[in-house]
Amino acid sequence: MKLVLIVYNVAIEEEVMESLKEIGVENYTKWDRVLGKGKTSGTHLDTDVWPGVNHMLAIAVEDEKKDKIMARVRELKSKEVLRREGIGVFVLPLEEMI
């Protein structure tokens, strides 16, 4: 199993959630107002100087579903507008869940 972390700008919330729904992702944990700095999206610190915030999803999945998620995020990143807003994925091994 894998733990897939997706960090994305709140401006593309609808596109991200719809894309995940289309490939059958139903269960996730979501963090709102995640702050940080990305390579393409810039700094999002929710301040006057660095406005903007991100969301983050944690999704525990089998390897097969992880591949579908990665393909879908690559598809989203291929769209200039979405890439500019920022979306990133981190995949970690998941040894055990209760």
Image (spheres, rainbow, N blue to C red):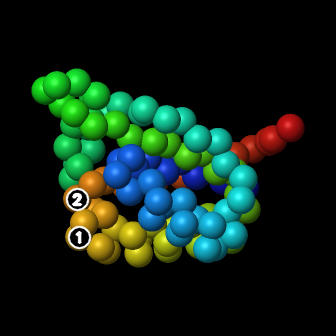
The reply to whether dot 2 and dot 1 touch (C-beta < 8 Å) is: yes
Name the residue type under label 2.
Arg
Camera-side residue of 93 and 14: 14
Q: Circle 2 is placed at which residue position? A: 84
Q: Is residue 93 visible?
A: no
Count of numbered tags: 2
Camera-side residue of 81 and 65: 81
Where does the image place residue 9, in percent across and percent down from the top left? Answer: 35, 48
Residue at horizontal 23 percent and vertical 70 percent from the top: 80
Q: Is residue 47 shown left or right of residue 68?
A: left
Residue at horizontal 27 percent and vertical 28 percent from the top: 45
| Residue found at the very far right of the displayed protein | 98
98 relative to 49, above or below: below
Q: Is residue 84 shown left or right of residue 6?
A: left
Secondary element at image label 2: helix
Q: Is residue 82 shown left or right of residue 13?
A: left
| Residue found at the very far left of the displayed protein | 49
Which quadrant of the figure contains the C terminus? top right
**In which image quadrant can residue 12 be found?**
bottom left
Q: Residues within 10 Å of mark 2 (few under 14, many from 20)?
A: some
Residue at horizontal 55 percent and vertical 46 percent from the top: 57
Q: Circle 1 is placed at which residue position? A: 80
Residue at horizontal 22 percent and vertical 24 percent from the top: 47
Where does the image place residue 62, in percent across and percent down from the top left? Answer: 73, 62
Secondary element at image label 1: helix
For residue 49, which numbered disc appears in the image? none
